[in-house]
Structures are given as C-alpha cells and as structure tokens.
Amino acid sequence: MQNVTVAAHPLAGHLLADLRRVGTPPERYRGVATRLASVLALEATASLPTVTEEVETPLTTTTVHRLGRPVVAVPILRAGLGMLTAVTDMFPDVGVGYVGLERDEQTLQPTEYYFKTPELSGAHVLLLDPMLATGGSAAFAANLLRERGATDLTLVCVIAAPEGIERLTTEDPDISIVTAAIDEKLNDVGYIVPGLGDFGDRLFGTF
Ligand code: PRP
Ligand code: URA
C-alpha cells in the first residue's frame, strides 16, 4: 500500500500496547496518546522540504537547513484532540484548524457540526484522527480540506482498519496515511478489531 506508512519505531508499538489495554484509565490514556502522537507526527513530517540558510555560530558561518513549508494540524473532534498537543509542542508555529464530526452509531455516517481552518494552500496539512474505521469520517474531512485548498495532506492515525484504508485511498488517492498499526477488520457495529474500543470515550472518560 503505497499511501500507508506504519511507524517502525519500537516506541510506537510500546505505547499502543497501553492504549489497547482495557484497564488503562483516562488520565494515563491522555499522556500515552500524546507521546504516541509525537512519534507519529515525526514520521508524518519526515519528508517536509527544507530551505538552506547561512547562520553565524559563535565560531564561524555555516549552512543550516530549516523547515521550508508551514505545517497545519486539523484534529477531527473530538478524539483527534488527543493528538493535537504533540503537534503544537513540536511545531510551535503550526496553524490549527478543526473539523467537528460525529459518527451516527446506527448508520455509521459522519455528521458535520463545526469546520474552521487557517490557510491550507502551500501547507503540509496533518489531519489528526486516532481511528480510521469505515473511513467515512476521514474521507469526509479530507474532502472538506481539499475544497479549502489542501494539496499536501496526510492522515495521522493510531489504528487503521483495512476497510478504512481502502475507502479513504479510493476517495482521495493522493492522501498519505501514517499509523501505528493496521488491524484485522471491523466488527458488525463498525468497531476496529482487535482495536482499542472507543478512543474518544477512553480519552475523556465518557463511558
Ligand atoms: C470516532 C473516531 C473517528 C471515527 C472513525 O469518532 O474518532 O472520528 O469514529 O470512524 P469511521 O472511520 O467509521 O468514520 P466518533 O464519531 O465516535 O466521535 P468522537 O471523536 O466524538 O468520539
Ligand atoms: N471509533 C473508535 O473510537 N473506535 C473504533 O473502533 C471505531 C471508531
């Protein structure tokens, strides 16, 4: 799958183990989610273009390489919020947009309740949503971002289901996906198996 990168760093699997474990409480969940999102955000920005500059060190002049493209992070509310701090800490200049979507538990269709972003054209846009299940939410959000001018778009997620990868890359063939794991399948109510349950509920303690 040429659009999909599974983070190879052993810390990704180590942290994901904590997120999967049923007994991990929300206060621990939030910290682990942030640390895992940092690993994934590094992977998702590994090919950012750089620009070359000259700087004066205390000893001499040397050539340095600085980030050459603005980064914009767009969490899908609400679970994507659990990944945002990782990106804003690592890229303090980042622009932040929000897409508010909620998946109907019966139909599994996403409904939009909020959408606001900074300028997206020319930016490296990171769409943040921990769970790529049917792919309906990510595909819906990606389409909104494309309409707003996003050309360089990456979904950063914690777990992807094969069904979601197939749908998202069919609807948006140019999107990149960075994930910590590709799981086996969806169950008959649209949850990822083996998965980790409902990420938003576990993050915010809404059981
Ligand atoms: C979850 C998750 C994704 C979506 C994935 O959100 O955070 O946004 O489901 O499912 P899909 O790929 O089948 O669309 P949910 O709608 O439960 O909202 P929440 O973030 O408010 O918990
Ligand atoms: N959303 C979640 O939070 N978990 C799933 O397994 C599927 C969608």
Image (cartoon, rainbow, N blue to C red):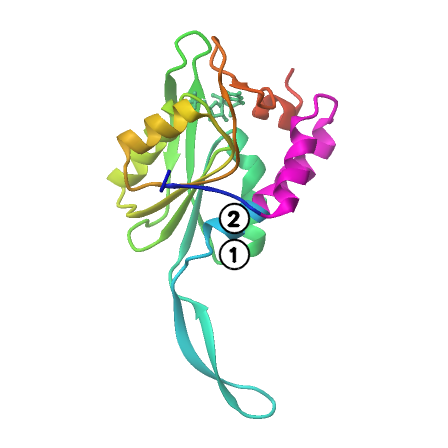
Q: Is residue 86 left or right of residue 4?
A: right
Q: Nearer the viewer, residue 116 or 9?
A: 9
Specify start and end residues of the magenta stretch as a single range: 9-38
- Residue pictured at 42% horizontal, 54% vertical: 71
Label 1 residue near ligand 1, CB within 8 Å: no
**Spot occupied by residue 186 in the image (x, y as percentages of width and height):** 48, 17
The quarter of the picture where the N terminus appears is top left
Q: Which label sits on residue 41?
A: 2
Disc 1 marks which residue? 91
Which residue is drawn at the image coordinates 50% and 12% (left, top)?
187
Q: Residue at x 41, y 21 (%)?
A: 134
Disc 2 and disc 1 in contact, CB within 8 angstroms: yes
Nearer to the camera, 99 or 186? 186
The type of residue carrying mark 2 is Ala
Q: What SS does tag 2 mark?
A: helix
Crowdedness of circle 2 by 10 Å Cα count: few (<14), some, many (20+)? many
Between residue 153 and residue 183, name the one nearer to us. Answer: 183
Where 137 sits versus 32, above or below?
above
Is residue 28 magenta-colored?
Answer: yes
Q: Name the residue furthest bottom.
A: 60
Disc nearer the start of the sequence (2/1): 2
Left or right of residue 142: residue 12: right
On residue 164, the disc is: none
User: Chief secondary structure of the magenta span?
Assistant: helix
Q: Position of residue 64 (x, y in %)?
A: 48, 77
| 2 vs 1, front mark | 2
Distance from Cα at disc 2 to Cα at disc 1? 10 Å
Amino acid type, callout 1: Phe
Q: Residue 45, image x and y in percent?
A: 46, 54
Q: In the rendered view, tell whether residue 202 sits above or below residue 105.
A: below
